[in-house]
Image (cartoon, grey):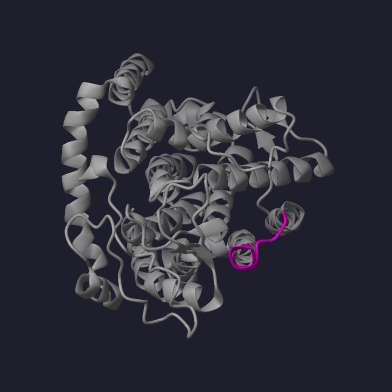
Amino acid sequence: MKVYLTLLVVSAIVAYVATPAMRHLAFRVGAVTAVRDRDVHKLPTARLGGVAIFLGIAAGILIAQNIPFLQPVYEASGAVWGVLAGAAIVCALGMADDIWDLDWMAKLAGQVLAALVMAWSGVQLVTVPIAGLTIGSSYLSLAATVIIVVVAMNAVNFVDGLDGLAAGMVAIGGSAFLTYTYVLARSASPGDYSSLATLILAVLVGGSIGFLPHNLHPARLFMGDTGSMVLGLMIAAAAIVVTGQIDPTVVSERERIPAFIPIVLPLMVVAIPLLDMTLAVIRRTLKGQSPFLPDAHHLHHVLLRSGHSHRWAVSVLYMWTAVLSFGTVSLVFLPARQSAVLLSVGIITALLVTFSPALRTRLSRGWRAAGDRARPLQRLTPEGHQQARHSADASGDTAQEAPDAAQPAGASAVPNASHPTVTPEEK
């Protein structure tokens, strides 16, 4: 586990350091999100944060190839390079979309290409852990792989609507998934704990954590489609490796791990994004609209309209992700009855936090304080010091920073995205 934790830290550091550079680049190339009716941010905000996440992931994978412990992962097949190539494709696709706003057909074609590259490298759904079902047709296996990857990418993209939401949810769910894949690797091959799925999740969680301090409310930049697609593809890759390429019956007999967990846990990790996407498709279809038409009725919009502050709405969705993912993983460590009790308590607690105004008010005070204590992490970078020099009065409702030093000439009319706009509820 030390090796995977080391790679997680390396990916986090690279992503954290690369994020300010991506913000400067975003202003230079015009990758800036304007304020739209459905948005919750108050000022135009730089995108391309997902490139920093990808760089953290790539750094972890490149370093891992020089670690003897992980050599079996690289020698077994080219799957790890296929995953990295697929992530690079959607990263480039996301950059193009963040700069030029591609139409949905172009993005879908790029997503399918990335999924195909990954599948051709060996990351392909072969078996389903339900009664030992095997996908007999290679074409059907390829199609199932592409569908899973594309759905995962778009699910993360749908939920990426609040500062820190997508990165935090992937970090939480990915940590639970990482724990399970490590236990599974130890059980499936005693003496050799190297695992492609665990490697993918370690660098994914690291990249998400490294980006998160820059993306917490008020966000200094967004991950954009670049980040959401990279996160979705990596989660899908890990899920396919575990679900479709490891025989869970062997592990279940040896360690009493339920055989259905490989297919249930990935669903729990992205349960909130999948639910949000499903509701959006149903909602728009019933209205006779395109499923790809944006609106302001996602789960996070509903939470904001119900009285949750920005940070507290994010924390509620974090909590649901943690309850569902870690509750499922608890089946690996606890008897089924105890795990069911633990999961039930978690769901009841999450329901109270979500729908109890009194409890929400009390807990949100502590969460706001925690968010304030996290701000020094942003000031560690040169941009953070510049932000501190140009910050306005404590309320921050009307003041604006001086133009960003990285903005090109003629772009000073765009307000600086790092200005901490504070809503009345969060003061």
Q: Residue at x 76, y 56 (%)?
A: 109
- Observer able to see residue 77: no
Query: Relative to the observer, which residue lies in front, 287 or 81?
Result: 287
The foreground one among 213 and 246 is: 213
Give the residue drawn at x 22%, y 68%: 391
Q: Is residue 419 left or right of residue 191?
A: left
The image shows residue 222 at horizontal and vertical percentages of 45, 59
Please tell me which residue is depicted at 69% across the width and 37% down the height of the picture: 291
Q: Position of residue 186 (x, y in %)?
A: 42, 44
Q: Does 408 sit above or below residue 387?
A: below
Residue 339 placement (x, y as % from top left): 34, 20
Using the image, determine if residue 350 lies above or below residue 372. above
In which quadrant will I find the C terminus?
A: top left
Direction from residue 300 to residue 234 in the image, left or right:
right
Q: Residue 203 sits in which quadrant? A: bottom left
Q: Which residues are magenta?
A: 95-103
Of the pair 185 and 128, the residue shown nearer to us: 128
- Residue 34 in sight from this viewpoint: yes
Q: Is 184 left or right of 280, judged from the image as shown?
A: left
On screen, residue 292 versus residue 18, left or right, reads right
Report the residue that reaches farthest toward the bottom.
409
State the count of labels: 0
- Which quadrant of the structure image shows residue 395? bottom left
Against 238, residue 97 (above or below) is: below
Asked whether residue 248 is drawn in magenta, I would say no
Give percent across and percent down for residue 44. 45, 62
Q: Give the prevailing secondary structure in the magenta stretch.
A: helix
Write the residue at 80% across / 39% down.
Answer: 140
